[in-house]
Amino acid sequence: MTRQDARKLDHATLEAIRIRAVQQVQAGESPEAVISALGFSSRCIYSWLAMYRAGGWDALKAKRIPGRPKKLKAQDIRWVYRTVTGRNPLQLGFPFALWTRAMIARLIVKRTGVRLSLVSVGRLLAQLGLTSQKPLWRAYQQDGSRVQHWLKHEYPRIQSAAKREKAEIYYEDESGVRSDLHSGKTWAPKGETPIVRVTGQRFSLNMIAAISPRGALRFMVVKGGVGAKVFIGFLKRLMHGQRRPVYLIVDGHPSHRAKAVKEYVDSLEGRLKLFFLPPYSPELNPDELVWNDVKNNAVGRAKFEGPKDLHRGVVSRLRFLQKRPDRVLSFFRAPETCYAAA
């Protein structure tokens, strides 16, 4: 792309371009993408951001109204943006993997000698279109190419085969829950942390569930571990009353690949087929969101007196979800699971 020369533009046009560019960055677009689309060199966008930071919108006018002196230069602001978006704090010697304003302030002092307050750092990040967000954690063992292959090739083939055979697709997963799981907040006087009295005993149980993109949910709650025998028991429940073949998508847990499981699946002569998600990719499984719902909306907010009480609470929430196919369908609308929607 041919680069534009700002010196050849009239004042009104240049002013409009500057303001529009800064607005786009603050709306969340990448500074590099914004300036590339406009056809200017990358130095321009960071100069404009520095101008805005020093004097507000008036500073972007072609005839600049003086503002307070700039503390950070354009190249410094560009460096901050590229560092926060392109590097991990661990790479720069910090003990944590998540960026904080204090970390960024320390880096700015080290690089430029300019000391900014935390409020000022936060304002700078906002001006760069960066927001504080809860990150998505990924196993470093995850193979991105296998994930992409699943999304672009494997799953579409499974969908096509299921359509030909008029099979029902289900996603299966297991999870455990403990009585000392707590989530949510409550109200209390300022400075007085509320206390909920619960039993000091700890008890737990395990859950197995399978959901379909049509809103169906099947589940089983068990005590003890979930091995091949328990998994086969769940498969028998899943297949009970099924008039159509079932394509069941699972993770690579050893119990799913056990010889006994394979023998049981083979005994059904094609009525049940297992397919395996890429390793270390739980975010691709919509069934994970069932556990999120159970733990955050039921177990984490309740008070349980014993194992029977916990069992009753978990089963009650799972039955509630069974009766709400619309809620089950919502688990297939998350950004990383929408690929599996019917």
Image: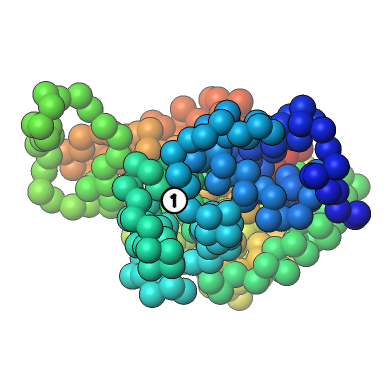
Q: Is residue 150 left or right of residue 209?
A: right
Q: Residue at x 91, y 54 (%)?
A: 2
Residue toward you, 148 or 267: 148
Task: Give percent across and percent down for residue 282.
Answer: 56, 57
What is the secondary structure assignment of the residue under circle 1? Answer: loop
Task: Give percent across and percent down for residue 86.
Answer: 58, 63
Image quadrant where residue 251 sits:
bottom right
Q: Residue at x 53, y 55 (%)?
A: 73
Residue toward you, 332 or 42: 42
Task: Give percent across and percent down for residue 161.
Answer: 86, 53
**Quadrant, the C terminus:** top right
Residue toward you, 121 or 151: 121
**Quadrant, the N terminus:** bottom right
Q: Is residue 90 left or right of residue 62?
A: left
Q: Residue at x 83, y 60 (%)?
A: 153
Image quadrant where residue 335 sits:
top right
Can residue 191 be seen in this snapshot? yes
Residue toward you, 91 or 202: 91
What amino acid type is highlighted by mark number 1? Lys
Residue at label 1?
71
Q: Is residue 194 above or below residue 166?
A: above
Task: Give percent across and percent down for residue 241.
Answer: 66, 39
Q: Is residue 315 above or below residue 265?
A: above
Q: Residue at x 50, y 40 (%)?
A: 53
Q: Is residue 126 above or below residue 249?
A: above
